[in-house]
Amino acid sequence: MMQSTKSRRKVAPTTATGTKTTATDNGSADSADKLDQLLLSSAICNNEDIGPFIRKAFTSGKPETLLLHLRHFARSKESEIEEVCKAHYQDFILAVDDLKSLLSDVDSLKSSLSTSNSKLQSVAGPLLDSLDSFLESRTVLQNVNLALGSISNCVRLIEICSRSNYHLSRNNFYMALKCLDSIETELLDKTPSSTLRRMLEKKIPEIRAHIERLVSKEFGNWLVEIRVVSRNLGQLAIGQASSARQREEDLRTKQRQAEEQSRLSLRDCVYVLQDEDEDEDDQHDQHDAVGLSNGLGNDGHSGGFDLTPLYRAYHINQTLGLEDRFKQYYFENRKLQLTSDFQVSSMTPFLESHQTFFAQIAGFFIVEDRVLRTSGGLISKMEVENLWETAMSKMCGVLEDQFSRMQTANHLLLIKDYVSLLGVTLRRYGYPVDALLDVLSKHRDKYHELLLSDCRKQIAEALAADKFEQMLMKKEYEYSMNVLSFQLQTSDIAPAFPYVAPFSSTVPDCCRIVRSFVEDSVSFMSYGGQLDFYDMVKKYLDRLLGEALDEALLKLINTAVHGVSQAMQMAANMAVMERACDFFFRHAAQLSGIPLRMAERGRRQFPLSRARDAAEDMLSGLLKAKVDGFMTLIENVNWMADEPPQSGNEYVNEVMIYLETLVSTAQQILPAEVLKRVLQEVLSHISEKIVGALYGDSVKRFNVTAIIGIDVDIRLLESFADNQAPIFSDGDANQLKLALSESRQLINLLLSNHPDNYLNPVIRERSYNALDHRKVVTISEKLRDPSDRLFGTFGSRGAKQNPKKKSLDVLIKRLRDVS
């Protein structure tokens, strides 16, 4: 076979040679035909397409040439085929011979194969049966394992579904959602049942939507409840701030008491008491701090304040992938709630609703502060600040509007106190409240104007009810309430009861009104963002005392005081009010928290000086009128008497009796200083009346004896002044005597042996400075009588002129020249 193969591979060259021989035999054709024949033969040998040769032949109109070439090629191949067949025939003969030689071997092999096949069939039959059984068992095993896997997945799926239902029934939404997520991510694709898969694909979104609805409903209920909780929380926080403020006030009161007691050398007792109280105050402060912390406990739930629904709703929405939507929903709803909290009912007076109004806002922002710090990003600090700015603007607007309508100082004070407590409360949580305090400061003047108006009415009512009678106090508590509480006592020794005070009921009534004014003013000024406000309180206190009280007292004195006893009581009241005014300024300083020495350093004159002067002038005027009644008896004086009266003239005796009676009565209620001023006025008036009598037209002439009698009268009056030394000091008694200086100097001049000394400026300034030279001229002329009896007492009626008369004539002449 290999040889036949080699013979077949040599066919092509032979064919080429044959072709060349044929071309030689056909040498008679032209070279072009030979070339075409050669190309055609080459194309057929190479199995190429002869289409181009055919088209060329028909195009040139010579198809016969092509047919000739093809026939020539066919004839050239026939010889080649014959040669090949001959070669193959030899090979075939050889192969047949080989097969015949193998026939016996094939027969033996056939029998051997048949035998082997019989044996193989007998042996492999059971094995094939076993293999079939194995394959069948393996298929069953695979089916069983697949079934077990499917059942396991289904069991796990059912268990997770059961847990999800359990959590849903317990409102444990987060765990239910985690179960749903586990089903979706781990089991849903592995579920063998398409029906179960479709059911789960339908139910899982429904369950999530159901959870979202439940959470939204719970959150909606929380939004409703938190408004009531916020109001209660705000009231609680403001109440704690009020308690803390009250403890501060109590501590200040005890410190003031300690300052007063320290002046009495009771420092040890004071310090022990203060230490104990400070410990108690510290415990109260710690209790308040714990109370506020518990009110906003770490778990978000204490005393009705529960943020759990909010946290759960936020967490569930985070789990559902709705975090941003829930944040926006929460912010918008809370903003709407805050806007509704701003609504002020026109049906309810703001005085009744202001606590609820401000407590609601305070509770709102306390809740928001807790949400900001504990919710993990539910609301941002910027959003809370924006809400606070909105609330601050609205609260300021409401306060401006309500304050502009109010016409009662107490209403303003009540609202101001609550607003200041609101500021203290919210400042603890970091909210700026300066704008609120600015609104309060802006209405400071209006408040004090209303307060002054109220005090004017109260003062007018208190003064109208005054009976100008000394106040009787039967019990110690009355003394403490009406005297000690205003530091009106003149001695630290408690009096015996019943005690008759030197003042009437007007004094403690007015003191209570002024003290209440001071306390209300300090209350309004304090906790308003201004630390040093004593000057403002003092300014308004000066207005109350100088405008309201002083004018009311002036009106009372000028319209209601008609008798000496009433005038004396008013003068006594004014003296006590002077001590009371010192207490008012000290009290204002203490309440304002400044040292008393600073208040005393800035003290001005007595603010009720006009009323005091009017009361004393009224008393003096009434006393002068009374004295004038007695001084009319001076007309009974014998101005040409031969002997002077030994015990004074009748008028002076009546005056002395009245003055002594007056002093014995007045010293019971009038302070010595006031009594001294009144007596000075009265004695000065008596002196003027005496000089006026000598100067007036009713006395035409008088002699020295009459002047000696007047001298006796003046000496009695001077003795009365000296007798007041136990009541006054010696210096004050001398001042009383100085009130008689005009009459005393005139009498001394008339009785002087050298009256012309009056012309000496030095002597006049030292001894006669109270005299008017015009009066001296007129009175001296009355003593210079042309009658011989005029100077009869100075000597005989000789031709020699009396030196005293000569001196008096010189005095009169010189004074007339000056005039």
Image (tube, rainbow, N blue to C red):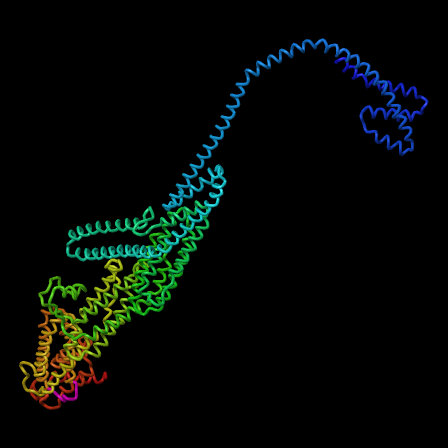
Left or right: 378, with 579 as reference point:
right
Look at 42% across and 39% down and name the residue there. 158
> Is residue 697 one of those drawn in magenta?
yes
**Residue 762 image offset from top left, x and y in percent:** 19, 74
Q: Is residue 368 left or right of residue 410?
A: right
Q: Which quadrant holds residue 21?
A: top right
Q: Is residue 796 magenta?
A: no
| In the depicted structure, whether residue 614 falls above or below residue 55 | below
Judge whether 349 appears above or below 656 on screen: above
Query: Is residue 375 something one can see in this rendering?
Result: yes
- Relative image position of residue 521 (x, y in whole percent): 28, 64
User: What range is drawn magenta here?
Assistant: 695-702
- Taking depth in this image into account, of 310 and 679 the one nearest to the observer is 310
| Residue 800 visible to the viewer | no
Magenta span: predominant SS is loop
- Image: 503 above or below 658: above
* Quarter location, residue 48: top right
Residue 384, above or below 108 = below
Say which of 39 and 448 sits in front.
Answer: 39
Q: Quadrant of the C terminus?
A: bottom left
In this orientation, which residue lies closer to the viewer: 658 or 498? 498
Q: Position of residue 372 (x, y in %)?
A: 39, 49
- Which quarter of the figure has residue 781? bottom left
Q: Nearer the viewer, residue 92 or 327?
A: 92
Image quadrant holding the N terminus, namely: top right
Q: Residue at x 15, y 89 (%)?
A: 698
